[in-house]
Image (cartoon, rainbow, N blue to C red):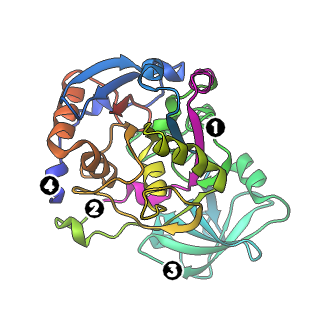
Amino acid sequence: MKLSDFDYPVPKSLIAKYPIEPRDNARLMVVNRKDGTIETRQFSDIVEYFQKGDALVLNETKVFPARLFGRKEKTNAKIEVLLLRELSKEEHIWDVIVDPARKVRIGNKIYFNDKLWCEVIDNTTSRGRTMRFNFTGDFYKLINKVGYTPLPPYIKREPEESDKTYYQTVYAKNIGAVAAPTAGLHFTRKLLGRLKRKGVGISNVTLHIGIGTFRLVEVEDLTKHKMDSEYFEIPPEACIPVNQAKDKKRSVFVCGTSAVRAVESSVTTMRKLTPARGWTDKFIYPPYDFKITDKLITNFHVPKSTLLMLVAAFAGYDLTMKAYKKAVREKYRMFSYGDAMLII
């Protein structure tokens, strides 16, 4: 398949700038792969599609306030720094993106407040830099005070204090993401409780979503696209509900494309989930043989994105694009703060 196959028109008015409250009041498009039917429900209705013995895989990565605004020494120019990942905990070295990049060179220092500043020690890409931070104590606690939620670039507004709550799943646990696993934003604790009482096993994995989730695919030939590597972890206890569901011929629901990439990166030849930790650059696009994922919970994704390609690999290209056309026609709320899709 080609990049241009995954383009579709999205009216700007459909791009959700704020989440629905309560979370599970979002619309849910249910796409049936067997008969090709598409129906509209409410996200809280998702419980009806689970059976006792099914498993639900959740990505418990936690978004941190990765956007920092500082001033360059001497010139006092305003510089935005987006933290990507920690390269050295001992030396406080981070991989970042800066804006405007033309003003930020090796040796420059950027001050955020009287306690926090950083120095550029290397260039990585056109906007990428390697920074060494000076600080004492808990770095994440410090940036919680000065940092802002890294909202996706298509949400055309400044981050607000409420985003620190709403651009985060209720089960977020492991700090390290610069983007939320947005399909999971619709779950409430009450809804998860209903699933557990129904006998659904919850499997918690981690994949720290990086800036690569927003990176444009720049090649028409998808076989030539290279995904950014992201850290993932599947603990032994996360494998138990999934493998029990497989043994009992029940369904494994995976919530979000990031969770799909995590579990599909750690599969045995017997199609069982196995404990793992490390980095994955797995790129899933049509055709693809899913080993773990039986049913997929996801949001509506940006045109030409790797996330949309994964959905098309799971649901089938024609059915996916049919569903997206219906979503636009029926004015579903799109992208990170938008409505959800369940593919069964």
Q: Are marks 4 and 1 in contact (CB under 8 Å)?
A: no
* Mark 4 and mark 2: Cα distance apart in space: 10 Å
Does dot 3 land on a helix, a strand or a loop? strand
Badge 2 is on which residue? 217
For the C terminus, the quadrant is top left
Badge 3 is on which residue? 123
Q: Earlier in the sequence, mark 3 or mark 1?
A: 3
In front of the other: 149 or 25: 25
* Mark 3 and mark 1: Cα distance apart in space: 36 Å
Whether residue 115 sits left or right of residue 144 in the image: it is right
- Please say whether residue 30 is one of the residues in the magenta stretch: no
Q: Are marks 4 and 2 in contact (CB under 8 Å)?
A: no
Q: Please state which of the two labelled residues, at mark 2 or mark 3, is closer to the viewer.
A: 2
Task: Give the numbered dot on residue 29.
Answer: none
Q: Amino acid at mark 3?
A: Asn
Q: Mark 2 Cα within 10 Å, few/some/many (few <14, many 20+)?
A: some
In front of the other: 103 or 36: 36
The magenta stretch is 190-216
Q: Are marks 3 and 1 in contact (CB under 8 Å)?
A: no
Q: Quadrant of residue 8?
A: top left
Task: Give the numbered dot on residue 171.
Answer: 1
Q: Earlier in the sequence, mark 2 or mark 1?
A: 1
Task: Give the numbered dot on residue 4.
Answer: 4
Q: Amino acid at mark 1?
A: Tyr
* Mark 4 and mark 1: Cα distance apart in space: 36 Å
Does dot 2 land on a helix, a strand or a loop? loop
Q: Earlier in the sequence, mark 2 or mark 3?
A: 3
Q: Amino acid at mark 2?
A: Val
Q: Mark 1 Cα within 10 Å, few/some/many (few <14, many 20+)?
A: some
Q: Amino acid at mark 4?
A: Ser
